Image (spheres, rainbow, N blue to C red):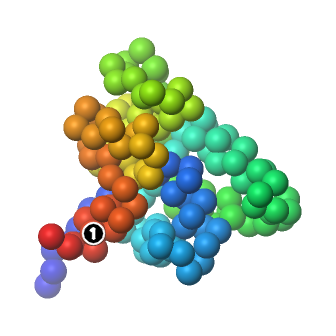
Amino acid sequence: MGKAVAPTKAVIDTNVLISAFLFARGRVSWLRRALRSGTVVPIVSRATVQELVRVLEYPKFALSREDREELLADFLPFAEVFPEPVPSLCNVECRDPDDQVFIELAIASGADVVVSGDADLLVLAGRVGGSILTAAEFRGRVEGEP
């Protein structure tokens, strides 16, 4: 019998989540399945959820209120909510202040990985407790590719 594998706890950048949930046949659609199966557990805080809600309201996505609520209902039940991190405990500073919440959350929660396509976060790889990976790199890790 196979050994049970613990789920990967991940802080996932808003843009990666948008790609996973809005584009069913996109390059990141696999992440939606990984969340549903419990292979990946997203770690969120009030600040990261507020950013997701704000971005979903962008006119370029043309999402109705019902669409936004449905997307959140499809994501949030799989998320582990972490209390607001204390910024002073974080000794890593992101170039983009809007991305700082993801680094603070990753450090405070002890997440295994931060998943992002944002260069301002990716340059911090090696400076936080867990890894900072692109969605493609994370997929390789989740699916066991060398």
The residue pinned by badge 1 equals 140
Q: In which quarter of the view is residue 24 placed? A: bottom right
Query: Is residue 98 visible from the viewing direction of this image?
Result: yes
The reply to whether residue 9 is visible in this rendering is no
Mark 1 crowd level (few <14, some 14–19, many ≥20, 10 Å Cα): few
Three-letter code, disc 1: Gly
Give the percent coordinates (x, y) of residue 123: 33, 38
Identify the residue shown where x is 82% and y is 62%: 62
Q: Name, please, the residue furthest toward the front.
A: 119
Q: Residue at x 36, y 43 (%)?
A: 122
Question: Residue 47: x, y in percent?
Answer: 60, 35
The picture quadrant where one finds residue 34 is bottom left
Residue 23 falls in image quadrant: bottom right
Quadrant where the C terminus lies?
bottom left
The vertical placement of 146 against 137, above or below, is below
For the point 56% across and 53% down, the residue is: 15
**Residue 71 in the figure: left or right of residue 126:** right
Left or right of residue 36: residue 109: left
